[in-house]
Image (spheres, rainbow, N blue to C red):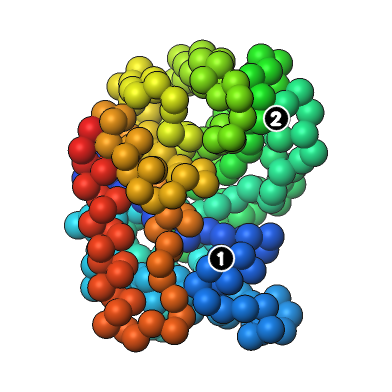
Amino acid sequence: MPNQQQLDKIKAGKGFIAALDQSGGSTPKALRLYGVEENAYSGDGEMYDMIHAMRSRIAKAPAFTGEKVVGAILFEMTMDRQIDGQPTASYMWEKRGVVPFLKVDKGLADEENGVQLMKSMPELDALCERAVAAGIFGTKMRSVVNAANAEGIKAIVSQQFEVGKQIISHGLVPIIEPEVTISISDKAAAEDLLLAELTAQLDTLPDDQMVMLKLTLPETANHYMSLVNHPRVASVVALSGGYSREEANARLSKNTGMIASFSRALTEGLSAQQSDDAFNAKIADTIESIYQASIAG
């Protein structure tokens, strides 16, 4: 069973979820935006040392606490590392009051029927066992919708819930994330199809099972309101999806009951070259703006 204190914090939704889960493919870009060029490290080991240093700096910032950041999504290597000599997940909860999640997907398959399903995860059970032992509360897994294709969207939601039930069996709360690409011309139509499929799957979950949803900010405000209120949903969080932080916050504030789970929009404006004072001031401003947008709805 999930930790009740952590579940209550997530359900209350007084804040947002920080996405600190950039993986192998997205780490170089995240570091570049942070002011660390690829010639500053050699090999994956040094690259992951650099990104962990960035994540640690964020986690240790005075403003990064459970008062406004209710959760943090970690990459597997982040879970396996330490902050100030303490395993990252327990540091997040015990020192910062932030509920720890783990990204579990292994990337995307090639596009078919307008969507990209998740690659198979043969080691998922073992990873979930490690996550439980590390003090992780829930998981996150991402797939992508690139077109309003009914067959594709049905397949993507079916896969998310099939894997979600496997995760629930370990006592973890899965974040179901079927991201709709923000640049597609039929985004609103895709969101209609997605809402219908998500509702159908949620309605089949037994009373003792619960998921979270991570969704692209919709074209129509409050499009996902029925999901926010669904008894099988602990929380609906929004991804920034490539929107600037300003636009993401503006869209989020119009969606009642949704809170943020931003990655790039969270680290926008942070730099390895900043002094600690400047870094901490910038992350405090960012956290405040995302927090206000999250509680505005």
Q: Secondary structure at mark 2?
A: strand
In the image, residue 159 sits, relative to residue 63, either above or below, namely above
Mark 2, Cα crowd under 10 Å, few <14 / some 14-19 / many 20+, is many
Find disc 1 in the rendering and name its residue. 30
- Please identify the quarter of the rendering in which residue 259 is found: top left
Of callouts 1 and 2, the N-terminal one: 1
Q: Nearer the viewer, residue 152 or 2?
A: 152
- Left or right, 133 with reference to 256: right
Q: Residues within 10 Å of mark 1 (few under 14, many from 20)?
A: many
Relative vertical location of residue 285 with respect to residue 108 in this rendering, above or below: below
Task: Measure how far apart labels 1 and 2 are at the Cα level.
Answer: 25 Å
Number of marks in the rendered image? 2
Which residue does the image show at 64% across and 68% down from the upper left?
A: 28
Let me know if residue 22 appears in the view. Answer: yes
Q: Quadrant of the C terminus?
A: top left
Residue marked by disc 2: 115
Name the amino acid type tagged 1: Ala
Type of amino acid at the residue the image marks with label 2: Val
Residue at horizontal 22 percent and vertical 47 percent from the top: 292
Query: Does residue 131 appear anywhere in the picture?
Result: no
Task: Tell me where residue 45 sits by quadrant.
Answer: bottom right
Quadrant, the N terminus: top left
Q: Residue 85's image quarter?
A: bottom left
**Where does the image place residue 132, in percent across and percent down from the top left?**
48, 55
Horizontal side of 92 relative to 26 (left or right) equals: left
How far from the left and from the top, in percent, is residue 270? Answer: 41, 71
Q: Position of residue 266 (x, y in %)?
A: 40, 58
Rendered location of residue 168, percent (x, y): 50, 37
Q: Secondary structure at mark 1?
A: helix
**Looking at the image, which residue is at 79% across and 28% down?**
112
Q: Which is more foreground, mark 1 or mark 2? A: 1
